[in-house]
Image (cartoon, rainbow, N blue to C red):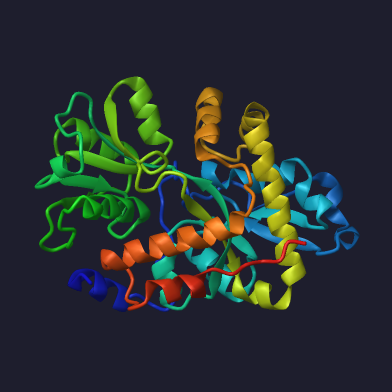
Amino acid sequence: MLNKHRLIMEGTAIFGVLLTVLTFGGCGVSTSAPSSNTASSDSSNSQTADYKYGTVEFPKSSSLCSSPIGIALAKGFFKEEGINAKLVTADTETRKVGLDTGRFAVTNGDFQFFPSIENGVKTKVVGALNKGCIKIAVKKGSPIKTAQDLKGKTIGVDEIGGTPYEAANLWLGDAGLNVDQKNGDVKYLPFDDANLEFEALQNGQIDAAALWDPLPTMQEEKGTVDIIFDLGTNPQFAKRFCCFLYGSKKIIDEKPDEMAAIIRALNKARDYIAQHPEESADLVMQNKYSTINDKALIVKLFKSYDYGVKDNEQAQIQDDVKFFSEGLKSIGFLKTDNPDAFADQVYQKIDLS
C-alpha cells in the first residue's frame, strides 16, 4: 500500500470523503443548490397516507448518471411502488449523514465510496445504475495516446482522491506505471472548476485532464480534445458498473420492504431510459434533472451508459464491487488486507420479490 494514501485514509474522519464533484458531475453528487429546497413528485401527493411507505426523500443531483431517480419520479414508478418521492437539496456532508442516519434511503455513487465505508459510513451497495462516465482527454493532436505516454506528465483532476483520480491511477497502475502519489510516474493537479481544467490543458499547464462526462464528450465534439481513456469502453473496465446505488444500512435493516420497493422503481426507470432514450432526454430537460441542455448529447450518453437491467444482475454487481475493491487495494486506497472480504462486506443483496 502506498504510504501517502495510507496516511490520507487513516486521517479521514469516520464519515470519510464520500464525494465532491463538479457542476457537470457524472456519477458524482452536485453540491450546487437549486433555488428551491424541495420538489414534490406531483401536486396530488400531499396526502401521503395514500402511499404505503409514505414520503421518501432523495437528494437532488445535476448528474446525468442519477437520471433514473428523476425518471422514476416523472413516470410514476415510485408511486406505483407506494412511495411518495420528494427531491431535496443536500450538500455532500448532508448526504453522508443522511445515509448514516437513514434520512436518505439511497443515493447514487461510485467506487470512491469504498474508502468512506471502510472508515465507518453505514451504507451498502444495494444495486447499480450505469457504466462509464469518466474520461481522460488530451489536447487535440497531442502525441500522448496511451497510459505509458503519460509517464512524467501532469494530469488535471477535480480533486486528489476523487473518482477520476482513482480511475486514472487504476488505468496507469494496470499499465505498469508507479502510481505512488509522492514518488509516482505521474503528477496530479486539482481544479475546482472543470472549465479551468480545460483551459489548463489548452495552455499546456497540464498534459491530460481526467473528468466526469459530459464535459470531455462536449469538448471532443467541439474538436478541442482527443479522448485517450474512457471508463465505459476501456478493455480493463468496459461493461463494469461504476455508478452503484448505495443504501442506508439503517433502512436495509429496519425497512427491507421499502428498500426493495425503491430499487424496483429505479430499475423500472433504468429500463425506461434504455428503451426510450429520447423521451427520457425530454423529461430530463423539462424537469431540469441535469445541467445538460443538449438533447442529442443526452441521448448519446444515455445509450453509452447501458442503463438496462440485466438478468442475474446482482451477481454482476457483486463481481464489480470485488473488482474495484481489489483495484483500490492495489493502488493504496483501501487499507484492508483482504479486498474480497471487504467487497462481501460492502455489497448487500436485496430481495426484490
* Residue 301 in picture, x, y percent from top left: 50, 33
- 35, above or below 323, in the image: above
Residue at point 12% right, 45% down?
153
Indicate left or right for 53 with 232 as reference: right
**Number of marks present in the image shown:** 0
Q: Residue at x 17, y 28 (%)?
A: 142
232 or 10, nearer to the observer? 232
Q: Left of 179 or right of it: where is 269?
A: right
Q: In this picture, is 66 found above or below 202?
A: below
Answer whether residue 62 is visible to the viewer in this image: no
Q: Percent position (x, y) of residue 193?
A: 33, 44
Report x, y in % for residue 21.
41, 51
Q: Quadrant of residue 199?
A: top left
Q: Position of residue 133 (x, y in %)?
A: 43, 42
Quarter of the image that includes the N terminus: bottom left
**Against 258, is 173 above or below?**
above
Using the image, determine if residue 214 lies above or below residue 68: above
* Quadrant for the C terminus in the image: bottom right
Q: Is residue 151 left or right of residue 321?
A: left
Residue pictured at 41% horizontal, 77% vertical: 119
In screen coordinates, is 229 left or right of 26?
Answer: left
- Decide if residue 282 is in sight here: yes
Q: Residue at x 51, y 59 (%)?
A: 91
From the viewer's side, name the closer residue of 167 and 35: 167
